[in-house]
Image: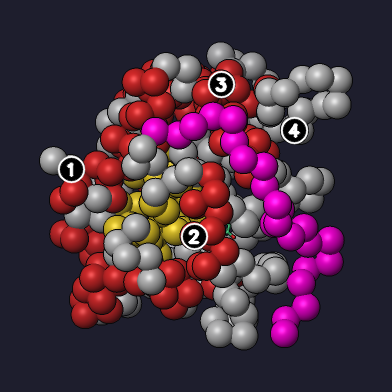
């Protein structure tokens, strides 16, 4: 058994039942599986070693929170070996789609096999603590290869890196989904220059979507204090609410379970679900965020 990274926080084993009832057919559009490492080993190039987080545990959480479907994003600790994610998608009875990490030399038959398993996108990661840099021409070669399948590209970067990545992103020929709103610094105003730049990036590029997920990762204030405040992660709300209201048809939400690399607290996933009505304040916005938008991107064939 691999030794976990020192200080690793395990996922919360007894999440509360959310007070917010998600609409029927809701999709948790950002979550991962880790191993189990005895069955699916971690990558030798990984930057962290997590605890196990199996597909059965993910599906149990899905049911507990009232969701119907998952989008399982390949975690960097598994590198470009997508076996654990693919295994979870295959075991889901069509209730999970996947986002893979692939290399530029992947063959058409390997891509087809991923497609059959339920993969609908690839992830390009620019967060330096998570991955070594992949050259842009290799990433573009991957994007060109996956475009004919109707897949999209998920990008993960931090807000200060957007200016230098902007031109590259505009050359990606598919839909693009940004993880966690491009990781804004929430000590800055939600209508300040840094976040305005991200809003402009989405406004000028109609192929760009955003996950309004991970308040627990972005928050400086943390989960609710003990002074009676029940609403979680208040300092992230203005950012996510702005994106949901400006681009209601291009937003997704996910738990990010099992929450890799959190350093100061592990969120109660039930509380994360109770964050949703703070950022999507009408039932129409909630339905778009949790059902209509992810269905359009991941299960278009099931839209009646
Ligand atoms: C996330 C965030 C992180 C990690 C990964 O694949 C990963 O290892 O995505 C992070 O450490 O910020 O979205 O899960």
Q: CA distance from mark 1 to mark 4?
A: 36 Å
Q: CA distance from mark 2 to mark 4?
A: 24 Å
- The residue lying at 52 percent from left, 23 percent from top is 277
Q: CA distance from mark 1 to mark 3?
A: 27 Å
Instruction: Kindly check if marks 3 and 2 are in contact, taking CB atoms under 8 A apart as contact.
Output: no
User: Which residue corresponds to mark 2?
Assistant: 59
Q: Nearer the viewer, residue 175 or 214?
A: 214
Tag nearer the camera, 3 or 2: 2
Q: Which quadrant of the view contains residue 111?
A: bottom left
Q: CA distance from mark 4 to mark 3?
A: 14 Å
Q: CA distance from mark 3 to mark 2?
A: 25 Å
Q: Residues within 10 Å of mark 1 (few under 14, many from 20)?
A: few
Q: Secondary structure at mark 3?
A: helix
- Name the quadrant of the C terminus: top left
Q: Is residue 133 magenta?
A: no
Instruction: Kindly check if marks 1 and 3 are in contact, taking CB atoms under 8 A apart as contact.
Output: no
Residue 52: image location, x then y, percent:
65, 71
User: Which residue corresponds to mark 3?
Assistant: 278
Instruction: Kindly check if marks 1 and 2 are in contact, taking CB atoms under 8 A apart as contact.
Output: no
Instruction: Pick whichever of labels 1 and 4 is earlier in the sequence.
Output: 4
Which image quarter has ligand 1?
A: bottom right
Q: Which quadrant of the view contains residue 108?
A: bottom left
Q: Is residue 279 above or below residue 155?
A: above
Q: Is residue 18 magenta?
A: yes
Q: Magenta span covers which residues?
A: 1-23
User: Which residue corresponds to mark 1?
Assistant: 303
Q: Which quadrant of the view contains residue 206?
A: top left
Which labelled disc corresponds to residue 223? 4
């Amino acid at each position: 058994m691999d030794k976990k990274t020192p200080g690793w926080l395990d996922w919360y084993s007894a999440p509360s039942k959310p007070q917010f009832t998600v609409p029927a057919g809701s999709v948790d559009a950002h979550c991962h599986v880790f191993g189990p490492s005895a069955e699916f080993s971690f990558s030798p190039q990984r930057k962290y070693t997590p605890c196990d987080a199996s597909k059965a545990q993910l599906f149990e959480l899905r049911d507990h929170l009232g969701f119907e479907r998952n989008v399982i994003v390949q975690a960097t600790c598994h590198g470009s070996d997508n076996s654990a994610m693919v295994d979870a998608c295959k075991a889901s009875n069509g209730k999970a789609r996947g986002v893979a990490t692939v290399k530029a030399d992947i063959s058409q038959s390997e891509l087809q096999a991923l497609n059959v398993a339920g993969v609908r996108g690839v992830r390009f990661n620019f967060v330096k603590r998570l991955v070594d840099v992949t050259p842009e021409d290799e990433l573009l070669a991957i994007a060109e290869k996956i475009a004919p399948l109707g897949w999209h590209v998920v990008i993960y970067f931090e807000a200060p890196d957007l200016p230098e990545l902007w031109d590259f992103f505009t050359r990606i020929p598919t839909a693009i989904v940004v993880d966690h709103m491009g990781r804004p610094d929430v000590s800055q105003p939600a209508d300040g220059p840094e976040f305005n730049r991200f809003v402009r990036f989405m406004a000028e590029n109609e192929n760009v979507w955003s996950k309004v997920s991970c308040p627990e990762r972005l928050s400086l204030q943390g989960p609710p204090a003990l002074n009676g405040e029940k609403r979680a992660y208040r300092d992230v709300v203005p950012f996510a609410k702005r994106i949901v209201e400006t681009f209601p048809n291009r937003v997704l939400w996910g738990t990010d379970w099992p929450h890799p690399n959190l350093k100061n607290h592990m969120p109660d996933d039930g509380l994360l679900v109770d964050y949703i009505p703070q950022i999507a304040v009408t039932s129409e916005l909630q339905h778009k965020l949790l059902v209509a938008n992810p269905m359009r991107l991941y299960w278009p064939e099931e839209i009646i």
